[in-house]
Image (cartoon, coloured by chain):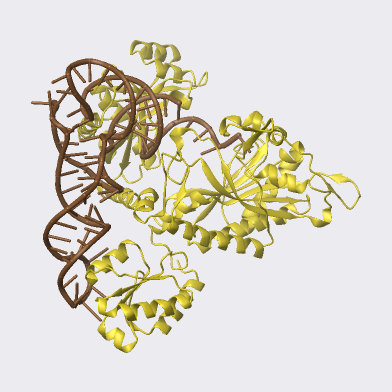
Amino acid sequence: MSEISQEIRRHSAAHIMAAAVKQLFPAAKFDIGPATDNGFYYDFDLEHRLTPEDLKSIEKGMRKLIGRKLPFERFELGRAEAEAKLSADNQTFKLERLKDVPEGAVITFYSCGDFCDLCRGPHVEHSGQIGAVKLMSLAGSYFRGDEKQPMLQRIYGVAFATDEELDAYLKMLEEAARRDHRKLGQELDLFSFSEQVGPGLVLWHPKGAFIRNLFETFWREEHYRNGYDLLYTPHIGQSVLWETSGHLDFYRDGMYAPMQIDEKDYYVKPMNCPFHIEVYQSRLRSYRELPLRWAELGTVYRYEKSGVLHGLLRVRGFTQDDAHIICTPEQIEDEIAEVLRFSLSIWTAFGFKDIKPYLATRPAKAVGDPERWAKALDSLRKAVEKAGLDCEVDEGGGAFYGPKIDLKVRDAIGREWQTTTIQFDFNLPERFDMTYIGDDGKKHRPYMVHRALFGSIERFFGILVEHYAGAFPLWLAPEQARILPVSEKQLDYAFAVKKELRAAGLRVEVDEQAAGLGAKIKGARNARVPYLLVVGEKEAAENQLGVRTRREGELGSMTPAALIEKMQLEIQNKDC
RNA sequence: GCCAAUGUAGCUCAGUCGGUAGAGCAAUUCACUCGUAAUGAAUAGGUCGUCCGUUCGAUUCGGAUCAUUGGCUCCA
């Protein structure tokens, strides 16, 4: 049975769930029930509001149906017959779906037990082949994913070939919950939100701010080293700027309402691009000064719909690690390859090794010269090739203003995150009439590429917390070592060691609590401090430290000088 | 924004079939001076998210609202 694909098994599980729902709620109207990455869902319309208790009953019903090894039977109907059948059952959503089946195509139904469904299949032979299932959650979802359509009730489930695989998946979910950056952010005192401040607006606490500052410094240094210049631009700009950029026409709903100053409307920026363009426009540009690579940690505000906010991963105020590359057509290929190489090198530094590019091409509605599109796409393809990566292509998935590459990185527990984006823009250079003087003395339109490497600092920080499970590597740890005196008698020695380590540039604290060593160790471990330095009578007498690290466990005694050397090496290497 | 759920001490949670609440951890104080994941005792801490209504009386019931959570839509 192992040849049956997960997808077929999961799709069949969706049918079985629908069958179980029909048993409990005969009046249910059905929409569709496809397979998902780890399971399946099915959308229903029914009077009754489903509750978690219903989920249990439905799951029980499914188990029974699976146990009975009911055969899946396929049969074909003509259009008129199919319509008659669905009308008789009052399956209005199915009737809508039937309209999607092209004229002349075979209309197939699958039945399993008492449940019969319009479906193109394929399915397992009988319900016993479905395997292990578990219903996970209830949700609302729009018919056809369109917010103007009625909202249906959706049940999500997971399905695996065996109980062991299901258990492993549930364990992974537990692990993900354990790493949840919102939970760790509170536990480790990294950041918070305040109802007084507003939803989606992050307050960075000292430790979180410290880590942020460290990787922002790293980011700046790497940018200078790799040929970028840094900019600072204002947080607000007049309406004329956003009229020129087109944001007021296309993106107004995503912007915070304007404030009026001296009878002019000022908008808080949702993007940095227009400001970078204004820097470009501040004087005449020659081909001799291209390429320009301008980066900024630019804080933007976007009015995200209330329902989409999610911890640090989706917020309303965030800092983009933005850059714009402005260059000539001759330079574009090298520039793109370089952006991709640089992006990969940064991700590697944080211990992300599995990185996958996704290429998005020209959509039906697009602006800009098709020849430029082709050249841009070609440069993106070549860059991916040069980096030795495979990429997935999303045909027509680009923005109206240009093609793009997005990178997805896989974290320590195998989850994929969309982060880096490298996007061509054929829109803004036109709107702002950006030009440079070429070697022919004439004006030319430059290429412009937007690039955000982390995406946003907030989002990246959230991903980092989950990637490291809160245990930041030594170079990023806000507190790198904690000295744990066995009793108060060793406090003087502890402070002397602290002074010595601090002088060497290490971030060290002394645990002054009047508590047992066990309690101090527990406290330091909970705070994810990488190095624990135990000092008792013996160590104080011999100028030693009892070293215990998060990575290597107990290392025995070491002099402060030896410890400094060890820690500095680890920091220098940015070991993850 | 839409569907659903949740909101009780700093944190995690219990509880009140309507008579203004309780635990553990954390905090504070005191004692203990301790050798690798929780020393003991005492103290303090809550307008039961907010507003409106029903009621003699609301943390509990109803409505609205805000926030959060899981999804949907969105992320030109």
Left or right: residue A194 compared with residue A367: left
In front: A487, or A110?
A487
Q: Quadrant of residue A553?
A: bottom left
Residue A340 locus on image (x, y percent): 62, 55
* Residue for point 49% across, 33% down: A305
In front: A146, or A227?
A227
For the C terminus of chain A, give its image quadrant.
Answer: bottom left
Left or right: residue A327 compared with residue A469: right
Residue A393 locus on image (x, y percent): 58, 44
Indicate whether A559 appears above or below A506.
Answer: below
Residue closest to the far right? A441
Give the yellow chain's letter. A
Query: How many numbered marks are there?
Result: 0
Left or right: residue A213 compared with residue A535: right
Q: Is residue A518 visible?
A: yes
Q: Is residue A69 visible?
A: no
Residue A230 locus on image (x, y percent): 67, 56
Image hue for chain B? brown
Q: Quadrant of residue B20?
A: top left
Indicate whether A372 appears above or below A523.
Answer: above
* Residue for point 40% across, 42% down: A37
In front: A346, or A296?
A296
Indicate whether A156 appears above or below A549.
Answer: above
* Residue for point 34% across, 10% down: A88
Indicate whether A273 appears above or below A227.
Answer: above
In front: A149, or A525?
A525
Residue B10 locus on image (x, y percent): 30, 48
For the N terminus of chain A, give its image quadrant.
Answer: top left
